[in-house]
Image (cartoon, rainbow, N blue to C red):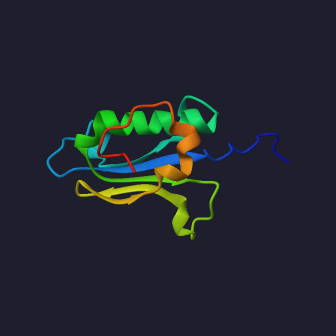
Amino acid sequence: MSSVQPTPRSHFDMFVTLSPGVISWFPGQKKKWCYPGNQFTDEPPKMLRNLLGLLQRKQHLFDVVELYDNTIAKDDPKRIILKIGGGVMIENRLTDYIEFIKNIPLSPFLKP
């Protein structure tokens, strides 16, 4: 029996794909990856604010962005909080998390 505890899944994750023509800074020119919300904090509101801040800073680099709430079942469409594809907003449910983000400035593109 192992004494190692599994790492709990982050409350929020953000999957991204680099836009065509953007050079990847990862080995092997990796173009897709997931930013875990719990990389710097274990508080869900801060996780969401950190991921949204990252998105606002690097939005111009990403072709696809999907922000997930991992407390919702994978097959539930409400799991996707924010979805951007090809620079077009497809899904924006940030109003459901207004208590988490009420004190941060959002770019006009992200405002619900």
Q: Quarter of the image holding residue 108?
A: top left
Q: Is residue 71 above or below residue 49?
A: below
Residue 11 shows in the view: yes
From the viewer's side, name the closer residue of 5 and 67: 67
- Residue 53 as seen in the image, left or right of residue 58: right
**How many tags in the picture?**
0
Residue 96, horizontal then vertical, whole percent: 54, 52
Please report the residue visible at 64 percent of the width from the left and 54 percent of the height from the top.
71
Residue 75, horizontal then vertical, whole percent: 57, 71
Most distant residue in the bottom direction: 75
Please report the residue visible at 36 percent of the width from the left and 40 percent of the height from the top.
55
Please report the residue visible at 32 percent of the width from the left and 56 percent of the height from the top.
84
Residue 38 shows in the view: no
Most distant residue in the left direction: 21
Q: Is residue 108 above or below residue 42?
A: below
Most distant residue in the right direction: 1
From the viewer's side, name the closer residue of 64 and 90: 90
Residue 106, horizontal then vertical, whole percent: 37, 37
